[in-house]
Image (spheres, rainbow, N blue to C red):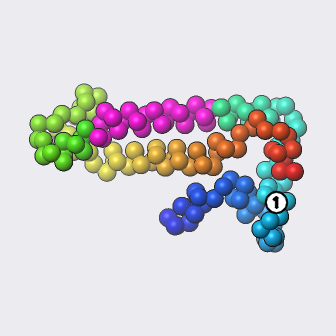
């Protein structure tokens, strides 16, 4: 399933939409099957507005997540790795780590690395699959015509 996940991640969003359509295969040069009817955005202002608001929220949350990853790498993960590489046993985590995990924490365990990896994967999938499909295109492009 991991191989499939990375194959799906590497596909452009329009290709994924065409895979959900009919089972018939078309020529590779034919662009008429890039979207299926379920992907069509109707001309209702309500749905277009809702799509625009949700896309803007995704952009904002993705930006906050990227900043969070950079901050955590700068404040927690990179100094920790640097201290481990040097064999520095006097290294202390930032104060917020001790408030959350207690004074007995000496190493970052799989839970810490798992959180970081989960956020990086989520941001990557969002950047590849969601952000390119912005709602501010012409209506014919959104409908897949």
State the residue lying farthest toward the front.
Answer: 29
- Give the overall secondary structure of the magenta segment: helix
The x, y position of residue 28, in whole percent, is 77, 68
Query: At x 36% / y 36%, what residue is drawn?
Result: 72
The x, y position of residue 126, in whole percent, is 58, 45
Query: At x 80% / y 35%, what residue is drawn?
Result: 48
Query: At x 58% / y 44%, what residue is drawn?
Result: 127
Q: Quadrant of residue 37?
A: bottom right
Neighbour tally class for label 1: few under 14, some 14-19, many 20 plus, Cα within 10 Å: some
In the image, which residues are magenta? 57-78
Query: In the visual, does 86 lie left or right of 38?
Result: left
Residue 99 at least partly seen: no
Query: In the visual, does 139 lie left or right of 129?
Result: right
Residue 27 at least partly seen: yes
Query: At x 25% / y 27%, what residue is drawn?
Result: 95
Q: Secondary structure at mark 1?
A: loop
The x, y position of residue 141, in whole percent, is 82, 45
- Number of on-image labels: 1
Query: In the visual, does 68 lie left or right of 9?
Result: left
For label 1, the residue is 31
Is 58 included in the stretch rendered in magenta? yes
The x, y position of residue 79, in whole percent, is 25, 38
Is 71 above or below relative to 111?
above
Q: Quadrant of residue 107?
A: top left
Is 55 included in the stretch rendered in magenta? no
């Amino acid at each position: 399933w991991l191989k499939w996940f990375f194959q799906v991640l590497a596909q452009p969003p329009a290709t994924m939409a065409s895979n959900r359509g009919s089972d018939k295969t078309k020529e590779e040069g034919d662009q008429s099957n890039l979207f299926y009817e379920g992907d069509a955005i109707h001309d209702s202002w309500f749905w277009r507005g809702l799509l625009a608001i949700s896309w803007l929220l995704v952009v904002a949350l993705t930006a906050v997540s990227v900043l969070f990853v950079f901050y955590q790498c700068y404040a927690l993960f990179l100094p920790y790795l640097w201290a481990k590489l040097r064999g520095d046993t006097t290294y202390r985590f930032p104060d917020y780590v001790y408030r959350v995990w207690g004074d007995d924490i000496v190493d970052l365990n799989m839970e810490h690395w798992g959180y970081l990896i989960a956020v990086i994967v989520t941001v990557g999938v969002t950047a590849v699959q969601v952000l390119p499909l912005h709602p501010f295109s012409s209506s014919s492009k959104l409908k897949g015509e």
